Amino acid sequence: MTTPRSIKKVFLAREQSEGAGARVRRSIGTPQLRNFSPFLMLDHFTIHPGAGFPDHPHRGQETITYLLSGGVDHEDFAGNKGTIGPGDLQFMTAGRGIMHAEMPRQNPDGSANVGMQLWVDLPKELKACEPRYRDLRADEIPAVDIDDNRVTVKVISGRSHGVDSVRDLAYTPVWIFDVTVQPGGSIQQELPAGWNAFAYTLNGTTTFSSGTKSSSAQGVAPWHNVVFEAEGDIVSAAVEEGAGAAGRFILVAGQPLDQKVVQYGPFVMNTEDEVYQAMMDFQTGQNGFERSKGWRSEIGKSMVH
């Protein structure tokens, strides 16, 4: 027997400045939602030409970048570089330390580059691992159509309606789905029991059920974070028959980590002393940051590529 998850809270992701001229709608990592292990931050970013995220360090977390439109180049101090395009993802493990840049492509029509970036905590025993990248291209992501083709689920990570994702791309177990529901369609998505879960709405108005009472369902407009209670094993969503547009949302679930989170900017550790050490290591170029001394990315030298 399946148990529907109740909605804990729903709130709008308000726009703010970030990086060099970029705009983000941040939901996780704000006063509205902190300490939602294993998730540290969720940004819905818009990067216009001339803006971006030039050279900056990380330690102790993984970042998952999902590009919705446009293109973003990345380059790090180890010589890794590449580009993700629409529908592509990049999984970056910072581990013991990395310094990199993320800069937008110049789109022919001058449009912005839009996507999602999720920060996921690393288990304390992996915070000193070597940094790594894994790219997942749009054409590698399996999809499943359900409810008479009124619902399409891109299975980025995890399992949906008998379809498994290509591979595990993050150290911390995380399920990610990109769900589009046409008017009159509905979905019940199973999630691992006890995992923290949320949905971020991108388009249309989607109605999310809350527990077993139909009267407690909520219609949610774009750019909202829908946070679910940990109890239960399915999330139910639908779009009303006759709605003017399909509903689209990103559904994410992750295994909570039983550990303290101490964060200072891009450094995410378990104690204050470890954060202080991370800052000192970056400033002095040691313990994983040796290659950061004097390094400047090529893509960061110009704010437009």
Image: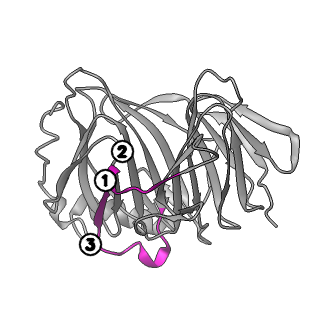
Left or right: 187 with respect to 62?
right
Q: CA distance from mark 1 to mark 3?
A: 32 Å
Mark 2, secondary structure of its residue: loop
Instruction: Categorize mark 3 by other alpha carbons within 10 Å: few (<14), some (14-19), many (20+).
Output: some
Badge number at residue 287: 3
Residue 139 magenta-highlighted: yes
Give the image location of residue 18, x and y in percent: 39, 34
Residue at the disc numbered 1? 137
* Amino acid type, mark 3: Asn
Circles 2 and 1: CB distance less than 8 Å? Answer: yes
260 with respect to 71 (left or right): right
Residue 209 occupies quadrant:
top right
| 79 relative to 57 in the view: left or right | left
* Local secondary structure at mark 3: loop
Q: Assign a secondary structure to mark 1.
A: loop
Q: For marks 2 and 1, give the CA distance.
A: 7 Å
Left or right, 292 with reference to 136: left
- Crowding near pointer 1: few (<14 within 10 Å), some, many (20+)? some
Q: Residue type at mark 1?
A: Arg
**Sequence-earlier tag: 2 or 1:** 2
Query: Which residue corresponds to mark 2?
Result: 87
Q: Nearer the viewer, residue 47 or 262?
A: 47
- Give the residues drawn in magenta, as a range: 121-144
Which residue corresponds to the image point at 33% horizontal and 70% vertical from the top-left?
Answer: 96
Q: Tell me which residue sits at (13%, 60%) in the image.
A: 79
Between 279 and 244, the one nearer to me in the picture: 244
In the rendered view, would you say 79 is above or below 199? below
